[in-house]
């Protein structure tokens, strides 16, 4: 069994993920459903061979040392992959996220129109949040590409690993990969500020140092885009503030209220009208009222502001889910299951 044979079958099936686990047949995720391919069970030796075919030397060294490694892999003529190699039951397992080679335009992603307006921001912090596999990377890539085609600016991306590969168009665009081009996000971000950037993409604000540097960069006139694994706008604000020691939280509330421009919280759904996925998106725009709530530690009131500000483009997650359901895009069961307030949404869908 050849690796290219498996990856070609996954690509043709429009899979989002490929799982190569010793002791099991190759399995793919198609529209959120795990589906075994009609292929033989992978042996311990074959799984190890696939790892050695894909991993660069530094990732292989990390794997030998830590039993886990993340890296990117390009299959010529097919796609790029974000790969996690790990050990399970003493054997190799590989989880591969397929990254389409072409960055989709924002207009093709079924996202709220207000998101395209965010690409015109001159400075500030824009966060795209959601669970793993919720489409955060694709949304950010589409936003970067829109700016790449429009502006004459310097864009730097800091990623783990590099996913979508951009070509410099109107902009000068540099992509740096964790491990290969920088030791940590914080280090990459600190040095990026000395590289004359206009726009910075930080793959994930995963620790205090990275978060502090991202907020400082936004405060000093850069447009900073990043992600967090949170499920709502208010939870995102609280997560950032909770990273800081108690004595610094008032100061960071003030800084965040000045720099944060928007929070987009995404959830992906399987479509029922045709094969594919569609996102539900909660949108928080930082109006003066929202900035005041952040500053005064009243983030629990943010959902109310979102509900009453639809006219300017804000939208709650449940409103977005309800719209998808009423348009015939998703099932009622999925809508209720992924809702922030299931009982309330169920009553709304039944009305």
Image: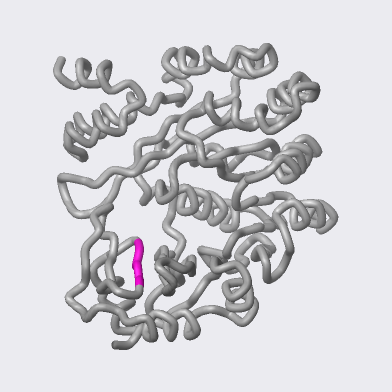
What residue is drawn where x is 73% and y is 30%?
244
Q: Nearer the viewer, residue 111 or 92?
A: 92
Left or right? Give the position of 299 relative to 192.
left
User: In the image, which residues are magenta?
Assistant: 17-21
Residue 181 belongs to magenta span: no
Work out whether 116 lies above or below 275. Answer: above
- Rendered-image quadrant of the N terminus: bottom left
Work out whether 231 lies above or below 87. Answer: above
The x, y position of residue 247, in whole percent, is: 80, 22
Residue 175 seen from this side = no
- Rendered-image quadrant of the C terminus: top left
Report the number of discs.
0
Work out whether 26 lies above or below 31. Answer: below
What residue is drawn where x is 50% and y is 84%?
52
Q: Nearer the viewer, residue 221 or 227?
A: 227
What residue is drawn where x is 40% and y is 35%?
281
Q: Quadrant of residue 75?
A: bottom left
Left or right? Give the position of 17 relative to 232.
left
- Return the residue found at the far right: 194
Residue 20 belongs to magenta span: yes
Work out whether 254 lies above or below 137. Answer: above
The x, y position of residue 265, in whole percent, is: 46, 35
The x, y position of residue 60, in whole percent, is: 58, 78
Q: Nearer the viewer, residue 77 or 145?
A: 77
Left or right? Give the position of 29 relative to 210.
left
The x, y position of residue 171, in whole percent, is: 66, 60
């Amino acid at each position: 069994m050849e690796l290219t044979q498996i990856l070609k079958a996954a690509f043709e099936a429009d899979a989002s993920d490929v799982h190569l686990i010793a002791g099991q047949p190759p399995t793919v995720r198609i529209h959120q459903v795990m589906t075994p391919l009609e292929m033989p069970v992978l042996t311990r030796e074959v799984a190890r061979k696939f790892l050695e075919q894909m991993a660069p030397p530094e990732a292989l060294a990390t794997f030998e040392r830590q039993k886990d490694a993340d890296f990117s892999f390009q299959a010529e003529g097919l796609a790029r992959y974000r790969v996690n190699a790990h050990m399970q039951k003493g054997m190799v397992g590989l989880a591969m996220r397929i990254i389409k080679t072409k960055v989709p335009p924002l207009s093709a992603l079924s996202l709220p129109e207000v998101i395209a307006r965010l690409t015109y921001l001159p400075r500030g912090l824009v966060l795209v949040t959601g669970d793993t596999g919720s489409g955060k990377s694709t949304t950010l890539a589409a936003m970067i590409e829109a700016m790449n085609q429009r502006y004459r600016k310097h864009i730097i991306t800091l990623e783990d690993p590099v996913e979508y590969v951009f070509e410099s168009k109107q902009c000068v665009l540099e992509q740096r990969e964790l491990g290969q081009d920088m030791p940590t996000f914080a280090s990459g971000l600190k040095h990026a500020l000395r590289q004359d950037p206009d726009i910075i993409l930080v793959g994930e604000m995963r620790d205090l140092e990275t978060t502090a540097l991202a907020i400082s960069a936004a405060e000093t006139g850069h447009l900073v885009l990043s992600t967090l694994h949170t499920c709502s706008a208010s939870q995102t604000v609280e997560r950032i503030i909770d990273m800081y020691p108690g004595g610094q939280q008032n100061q960071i509330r003030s800084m965040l209220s000045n720099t944060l421009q928007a929070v987009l919280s995404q959830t992906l759904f399987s479509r029922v009208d045709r094969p594919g996925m569609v996102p539900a998106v909660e949108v928080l725009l930082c109006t003066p009222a929202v900035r005041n709530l952040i500053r005064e530690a009243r983030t629990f009131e943010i959902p109310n502001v979102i509900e009453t500000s639809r006219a300017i483009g804000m939208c709650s997650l449940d409103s977005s889910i309800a719209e998808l359901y009423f348009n015939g895009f998703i099932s009622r069961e999925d809508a209720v299951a992924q809702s922030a307030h299931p009982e309330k949404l169920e009553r709304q869908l039944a009305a």
